[in-house]
Structure formats: structure tokens, C-alpha cells
Image: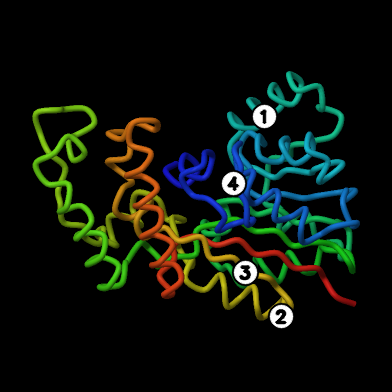
């Protein structure tokens, strides 16, 4: 959620597509335009774990993909997605399926566009998911991923914990560390790893195999272009305190925090990444 919030305005600029943009996921969409060029629009796309399909609907409306088949394991989200597609007058361009895409979609070279957006990190075996992605893609089709690629089960490295904690301690005894519900209490200044067993019990799929995503992408798409998009600050340090910032009045402060995040990203500390790759013949 924090990732989406900060990337939907100008706080995080130029890292993704090289220019200031606004709009939901617009930076990554512009990157697709730059990368794919005349291959756009892609005729037929597939998306796994797309929820209500608002990201896929956006890609259709912006002319990136003509049609989508979307697989989801929540009937409630599928119902909401169908309503949204009707509202946007594109219900003839997006089809929702309840079930396991890996089992149902076994035909090779069927799609022109494979879409993963914050769902690949929920796959229990990311290498299998990416191998499947390559298999269902037609030669010349595009693999597109915008996802969490950080530590599996959120078992953050010591260096990231240290950086995030230092940032939070700078806000000690200020409104920025106020509890979002109970204002008289403060959020902890120290960032710790979550209990792995409790995390798995709560959600067995959460970041199950996420730290293998980048290597798996390169294994099956050696030509992939990877854009690291940070996250040590906006995801790890700020995730539970971002609502204490005012987008307008705190813009300078948010921009400075995003500069720190970008520096962390350039040093190899990343939670999120974008991958683009054509399937070669």
C-alpha cells in the first residue's frame, strides 16, 4: 500500500521511467511504453492474482494490452472486478477466471503479454511461476513484472534493519511516530524482523520465495531489463507511519526520504523491482 501511495504521486520520481509522472503505477506503465515501443498494443494478456483487475483495466484503457484473461482465487474480488469492468465499459475486453492458472493454462505460446503486479511474491515457487510465464508467452511476447523482490518471509538483512531504524529514530518524540489509531501512543522506533512462524501461520503465501525472483527472471529471460525501485525507506521504515505525513506540507521531507531510498537502492538494498523482457525465439 505504501509502495502504491508513494509511486502514485511525485514523491518518487525518475527512478522508474526517467521523468516526473502522476497517476497510479504510471511510472511503470511509461517504462513499458519505452521498452516495448512499436510492439504495443499487445493483443492478448494474462494476469495471475490480479484481484479486482484495476491494474489490468488501466493497461487496457491506456492502450498497452487489447484484452486480458485474469486468474484470481477470491470470488469476491472477481465479482468486484466484473462490476468495475462494466463501469469502465470494457467488460468485453477482460475475462475473470476462478482457479489455478498454472493448471488451467497449459498451452504453450498462447499469450502476447504476461502480467505480474504484486502477486508473484505470493507464489510458493517463483521459479516455477516464471518458467510457466515463459511457456505461455508467444515468441516476441512481453513478460512484465512489478513486484516485491525483497527478503523471503520479510527476514530483513541486518543492514536494512539498521538503516530503517536510524530513519525512524530521527522522528522520535514527534507526530510522525504517533500511532495511527491511538494517538497518545507512539510507534516503535526500532525496526525488527517479523516472527517467521507467525507470519507463515497468518499467510502461508506472504513473500514465500521472494528473494529468488530476480535470479529466476534472469534464468528464463536472460535479456531482461530490471529496474530496482528501492523500498528500504518507504516500505520498511515508513510503512506504518506514512499516514502521519501530509502530502503537501511534508513534500520536501518526503522527497528527501525518497532520495535516501534511492541511494539505498543504488547500493543494492531493494524491496521492489520491475522486470521487462521479450521472449526470444
How many angstroms separate mark 2 from mark 4 (CA)?
Answer: 29 Å
Q: Is residue 201 above or below residue 141?
A: above
Sequence-wise first label, 4 or 1? 4
**Cα distance, mark 4 to mark 3?**
19 Å
Please provide percent x and percent y for residue 244: 27, 34
The Cα atoms of the two marked residues, 2 and 1, are separated by 34 Å
In the structure shown, which secondary structural element does the residue marked by tag 4 occupy? loop
- The first of marks 2 and 1 along the sequence is 1
| Residue holding disc 4 | 20
How far from the left and from the top, in percent, is residue 123?
Answer: 55, 60
Look at the numbered disc 2 and give the secondary structure of its residue: loop
Task: Please name the residue that numbered disc 1 is placed on.
Answer: 81
Distance CA(mark 1)–CA(mark 3):
29 Å
- 167 left or right of 228? left
Q: In x, y percent, where is residue 30?
A: 71, 50
Disc 3 versus disc 2: nearer the observer:
3
Would residue 120 appear left or right of 209 to someone viewing this image? right
Disc 1 or 3, which lies upstream in sequence? 1
Q: Marks 4 and 1: which is nearer the front?
A: 4
Q: Mark 3 points at which residue?
A: 226
Image disc number at residue 222: 2
Numbered disc 3: secondary structure: strand
Kindly identify the residue that appears in the image at 53 percent across and 50 percent down. Answer: 13
Q: Which residue is drawn at 76% across and 57% down?
A: 34
Amino acid at each position: 500500500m505504501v509502495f502504491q501511495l508513494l509511486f502514485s504521486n511525485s514523491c518518487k520520481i525518475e527512478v522508474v521511467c526517467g521523468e516526473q509522472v502522476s497517476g497510479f503505477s504510471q511510472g511503470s506503465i511509461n517504462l513499458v511504453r519505452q521498452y516495448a515501443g512499436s510492439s504495443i498494443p499487445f493483443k492478448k494478456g494474462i494476469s495471475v492474482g490480479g484481484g479486482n483487475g484495476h491494474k489490468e483495466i488501466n493497461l487496457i484503457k491506456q492502450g498497452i494490452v487489447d484484452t486480458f484473461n485474469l486468474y484470481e482465487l477470491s470470488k469476491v474480488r472477481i465479482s468486484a472486478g466484473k462490476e468495475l469492468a462494466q463501469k469502465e465499459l470494457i467488460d468485453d475486453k477482460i475475462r475473470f477466471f476462478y482457479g489455478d492458472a498454472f493448471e488451467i493454462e497449459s498451452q504453450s505460446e498462447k499469450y502476447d503479454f504476461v502480467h505480474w503486479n504484486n502477486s508473484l511474491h505470493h507464489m510458493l515457487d517463483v521459479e516455477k511461476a516464471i518458467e510457466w510465464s515463459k511457456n505461455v508467452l508467444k515468441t516476441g511476447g512481453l513478460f512484465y513484472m512489478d513486484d516485491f523482490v525483497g527478503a523471503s518471509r520479510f527476514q530483513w538483512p541486518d543492514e536494512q534493519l539498521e538503516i530503517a531504524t536510524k530513519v525512524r529514530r530521527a522522528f522520535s518524540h514527534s507526530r510522525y511516530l504517533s500511532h495511527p489509531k491511538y494517538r497518545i501512543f507512539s510507534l516503535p522506533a526500532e525496526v525488527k524482523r517479523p516472527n517467521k512462524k507467525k507470519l507463515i501461520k497468518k499467510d502461508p503465501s506472504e513473500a514465500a520465495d521472494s528473494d529468488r525472483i530476480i535470479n529466476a527472471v534472469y534464468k528464463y529471460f536472460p535479456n531482461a531489463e530490471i529496474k530496482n525501485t528501492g523500498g528500504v525507506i518507504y516500505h520498511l521504515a515508513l510503512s506504518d507511519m506514512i499516514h502521519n505525513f501530509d502530502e503537501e506540507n511534508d513534500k520536501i521531507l518526503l522527497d528527501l526520504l525518497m532520495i535516501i531510498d534511492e541511494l539505498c537502492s543504488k547500493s543494492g538494498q531493494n524491496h521492489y523491482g520491475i522486470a521487462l523482457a521479450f521472449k526470444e525465439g
